[in-house]
Amino acid sequence: MSGHSKFANIKHKKEKNDAAKGKIFTVIGRELAVAVKAGGPDPNSNSRLRDAIAKAKSNNMPNDTIERSIKKAAGNLDAVNYESITYEGYGPKGVAVIVEVLTDNKNRSAANVRSAFTKGGGNMGTTGCVSFMFDEKGQIIIEKNDDLDAEELEMIAIEAGAEDISEEEDSFEIITAPDDFSSVREALENAGIEMAEAEVSMIPQTYTELTDEDDIKKMNKLLDMLDEDDDVKNVYHNWSE
């Protein structure tokens, strides 16, 4: 077992997001709609939808809200016109930042993301300027509890195709190849193992430290502005908080 667990970071994000569930549910609702349009409303035959539902549940989205979103998308496929766009850039001191958006207005999203970079003491770059510093991996975080058997967890994950498992003080982190993510997540779900976080993620190869208070303040402003934008689906960075 090895790796770099970001569970503390995820807990911080989830606590912060508890005050803004509407924003999370808006983004997940869009992901559900895009998944339905891509592969239909039946999760049994649509793995992308199964993954989106799992993400919704890990963010405490009520089942009836999930079902409503799926039915709404299935009944109005022509209205589902969200586009996935990825922006890349730099925060203070060259911190690498990747921003994924799901939007129905490219111009609005580009302007908002650019503004966040500028006000956060950074700048947007060209496609590919920082993504080479990250690895795309399935990432599953499981909070430790008394009922969880580490050896059993490792066996289930490895048999389902996981690449690596790391054990930290308060969590386990499971890493998979993107193509194996769904099968590993489903194996854990079928075993009744609760996941704090489960999605395909961009994991930094190296991390950048910020020591100057002004740089830290600016980096937090950049992340907060992106966090508050309804179009922003995911933000990845290599700041070692």
Image (cartoon, rainbow, N blue to C red):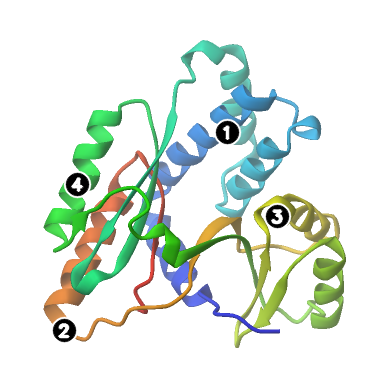
The quarter in which the C terminus is drawn is bottom left
Query: Within 10 angstroms of label 4, few (less than 14), some, or many (20 or more) residues?
Result: some
Locate residue 199 relative to residue 97 in the image: left or right: right
The nearer-to-camera label among 1 and 2 is 2
- Tell me if residue 151 comes above or below residue 97 in the rendering: below
Closer to the camera in the image, 111 or 229: 111
Closer to the N terminus: mark 4 or mark 1? 1
Q: Which residue is drawn at 33% across and 57% down?
A: 129
Locate residue 199 relative to residue 103 in the image: left or right: right
- The residue identified by callout 2 is 212
Which residue type does callout 4 highlight?
Answer: Arg
The nearer-to-camera label among 3 and 1 is 3
**Could you say which disc has been placed on residue 181 in the image?**
3
Please provide percent x and percent y for residue 214.
Answer: 12, 77
- The residue identified by callout 1 is 32
The reply to whether the C-beta atoms of the residues labelled 1 and 2 are less than 8 Å apart is: no
Which residue type does callout 1 highlight?
Answer: Leu
